């Protein structure tokens, strides 16, 4: 396949794989309310689970940057390893669901592994798109957005009859997504290499006011974004409960949540790119 055509093939595979793997991000948050009675907590399950994944992602990103993993390890293999490990931690979540503290450690670990998925996908796609990179990354981020919303639509599938099935199905998607990247793609000879991590760089960044303002803006954006993604399904469920009950209530809530988070996110990401 010609290089010009192959890079679009890379973009498609990476975006679809990203979508599949990122279905794990909110899978546990989606079903956390069902496990609150088992854990002995009330109204905090979704919040705590979401927080643990987020903290794990931040820790994973810091560890990866400090060790320079994206340069020392083949990006495709790192993506696949992270995808499979995320799936394993999620499956352990299903097996050990009665143990709250263990579950939180597993969600933290899942978040850490996710740091080897999204940033690495961005690295791989950036290498193949020296031009039109904005559009390419917009499409990758669209895959991420759609993936985070995927649990809400998975719950509406006829063969997903309980929370365990959602977690297991999302884990399967993650494994398949990682395998696609490993076996369907080959490495770019002009792979972008990140600069070596230096502690002095942190001081330089902190002293750079425009960069720090941009960082604070991004931090605030991500804080409100994930808060909204966590809250909107709960809000919709409570709102639709005035009009619907039972399986129809869950179905409509799932469709609405997927549309608001996923479809609108895809539109914004692609147009923004």
Image (cartoon, rainbow, N blue to C red):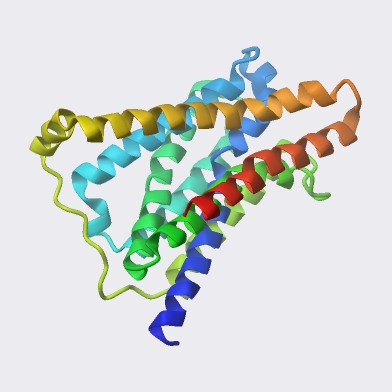
Judge by depth and name the residue closer to the eye, 116 or 8.
8
Give the x, y percent position of residue 134: 41, 58
Question: Quick check: 100 above or below 187?
Answer: above
Which residue is nearer to you in this view: 30 or 97?
Answer: 30
Q: Nearer the viewer, residue 80 or 214?
A: 214
Tell me where residue 18 appears, x and y as whole percent: 51, 55
Q: Is residue 184 left or right of residue 214?
A: right
Q: In the displayed structure, would residue 69 be above or below residue 181?
A: above
Q: Residue at x 48, y 63 (%)?
A: 14
Q: Residue 89 at x, y = what percent?
A: 49, 42
The structure residue drawn at horizontal position 12% and vertical position 38%, both measured from the top left corner, is 201
Question: Farthest residue in the left direction?
Answer: 200
Residue at 11% across, 36% down: 199
Q: Going by the image, does 132 lie left or right of 145? A: left
Q: Name the residue at 70% across, 25% down.
A: 234
Inspect this view and state whether residue 97 appears. no
Say above or below: 127 vs 94: below
Residue nearest the viewer, comparing 142 with 173 = 142
């Amino acid at each position: 396949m010609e290089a010009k055509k192959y890079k679009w093939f890379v973009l498609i595979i990476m975006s679809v794989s990203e979508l599949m793997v990122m279905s794990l991000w909110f899978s546990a948050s989606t079903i956390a309310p069902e496990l609150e009675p088992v854990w002995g907590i009330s109204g905090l399950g979704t919040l705590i689970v979401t927080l643990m994944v987020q903290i794990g992602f931040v820790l994973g990103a810091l560890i990866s940057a400090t060790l320079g993993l994206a340069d020392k390890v083949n990006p495709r293999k790192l993506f696949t390893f992270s995808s499979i490990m995320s799936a394993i931690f999620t499956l352990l979540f299903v097996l050990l669901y009665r143990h709250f503290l263990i579950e939180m450690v597993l969600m933290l670990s899942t978040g850490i592994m996710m740091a080897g998925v999204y940033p690495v996908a961005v690295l791989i796609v950036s290498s193949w798109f020296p031009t039109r990179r904005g559009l390419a990354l917009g499409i990758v981020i669209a895959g991420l957005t759609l993936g985070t919303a995927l649990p809400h639509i998975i719950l509406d599938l006829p063969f997903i009859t309980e929370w365990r099935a959602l977690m297991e199905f999302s884990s399967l998607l993650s494994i398949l997504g990682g395998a696609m990247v490993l076996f369907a793609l080959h490495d770019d000879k002009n792979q972008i290499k990140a600069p070596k991590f230096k502690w002095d760089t942190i001081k330089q960044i902190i002293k750079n006011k425009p960069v720090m303002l941009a960082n604070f803006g991004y931090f605030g954006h991500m804080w409100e974004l994930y808060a909204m993604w966590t809250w909107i399904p709960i809000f919709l469920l409570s709102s639709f409960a005035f009009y619907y009950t039972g399986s129809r209530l869950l179905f409509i809530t799932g469709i609405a949540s997927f549309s608001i988070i996923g479809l609108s996110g895809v539109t914004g990401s692609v147009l923004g790119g």
